[in-house]
Amino acid sequence: MILQKRNRILRSSAALRSLVAETTLTPNDFIAPLFIDEGDNIAHEIPSMSGYYRYSLDLTIKEVKELWALGIKSVLLFIKCKDELKDNTGKESWNKDGLMQRSIKAIKEAVPGMIVMTDVALDPYSEYGHDGIVKDGKIVNDETVEALMRMSLSHAEAGADFVAPSDMMDGRIGAIRNILEENSFREVGIMSYSAKYASCFYGPFRDALDSAPGFGDKKTYQMNYANRLEAIKETGQDIEEGADIVMVKPAMAYLDIIREIRNQFNVPVSAYHVSGEYAMIKAAAKMGWIDENKAIIESLTSIKRAGADLIATYFAKDAAKLLNA
């Protein structure tokens, strides 16, 4: 049998496969999400996210130092707000002495080179668990944007490198860019959750921060998972309004959306490998159905292959260790 082309030649050894690999995954690709709680020396394992913890600030600093040593250059901060501080205005989110603001300052002081990104949304601070202010049973847009502006400015004042609006309110990117400019925070970036879908894969995250909606769902502001063109429209608008990085969330069930946005726009694209995607791998590995380490690397490589420049993932630390081995 004589063949003119034998494609298997380029797959014949591990060294050769590595040499011709089209996609390369490194710790530089990762954003590590961190959950932060009040108190000291607290490490609370999240029941639905085996092996992942909500730390007090002192242990968060230790974690950030370990991430930096592994080559991870960015963290994305989420805080657990005390119930007594929650209301329908979200005012705790712009408290200059709030947990988020103290966390930003402490991390930048401990590891100055770490890129600190901060979640901008009202759900951790809302008595209703929604990403916006509630009036007459509805999530109102414009009043929410005003709160998000104040929240973003507060994060910038505390030293955040990027604010990351995850709320999906209309017009919030332009409004946040304007308030940052007006207050001379011209070097603070915006990583916009531009295509954030109303997904069932967020469940464990809401368990981590006790931020599940108290009524209804989030489908009036997060996107319909049946839609593709809408993601392009939303992303384009965010870029026009001043987003520096755009995000698709979730990641693995939306690889086609990541590729669409990568093809359409010339800005860095991030993807969020969300809590439910993490939990599924952990659960299957616990049952012995898959090899956890192989599943981690294959999943993250698929997200990057789809077009993501950056990947927010709860596997950041584990993946960095595997890649550095």
Image (cartoon, grey):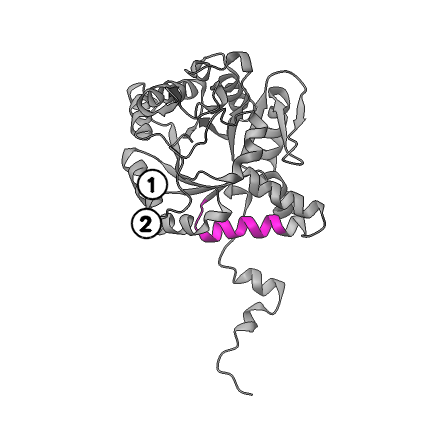
Mark 2 and mark 1 residues within 8 Å of each other at the beta carbon: yes
Tell me which amino acid carries mark 2: Gln
Residue 71 visible within the image:
no
Whether residue 103 appears in this view of the structure is: yes
Q: Which residue is mark 1?
A: 235
Q: Is residue 308 magenta?
A: yes
Q: Residues within 10 Å of mark 1 (few under 14, many from 20)?
A: many
Q: Main secondary structure of the magenta part?
A: helix
The residue nearer to you, when weighing 78 against 319, is 78
Question: Counting residues from the N terminus, which is met first, the one under dot 2 or under dot 1?
Answer: 1
Residue drawn 52% across the image and 60% down it: 21
Residue 317 falls left or right of residue 140: right
| Residue position for label 2 | 264
Q: Is residue 104 above or below residue 69?
A: above
Q: Residue at (67%, 35%) from the top-left corner?
A: 51
Look at the image and say whether residue 203 sits in the magenta stretch: no
Q: Give the SS element for disc 1.
A: helix
The magenta region covers 295-309
Report x, y in % for residue 26.
Answer: 54, 47
- On the image, the x and y values in percent for residue 221 come to 38, 33
Viewed as shown, does residue 48 lie left or right of 265?
A: right
Q: Is residue 237 left or right of residue 294?
A: left
The one of 275 and 186 positioned closer to us in this rendering: 275
Q: Nearer the viewer, residue 159 or 50?
A: 50
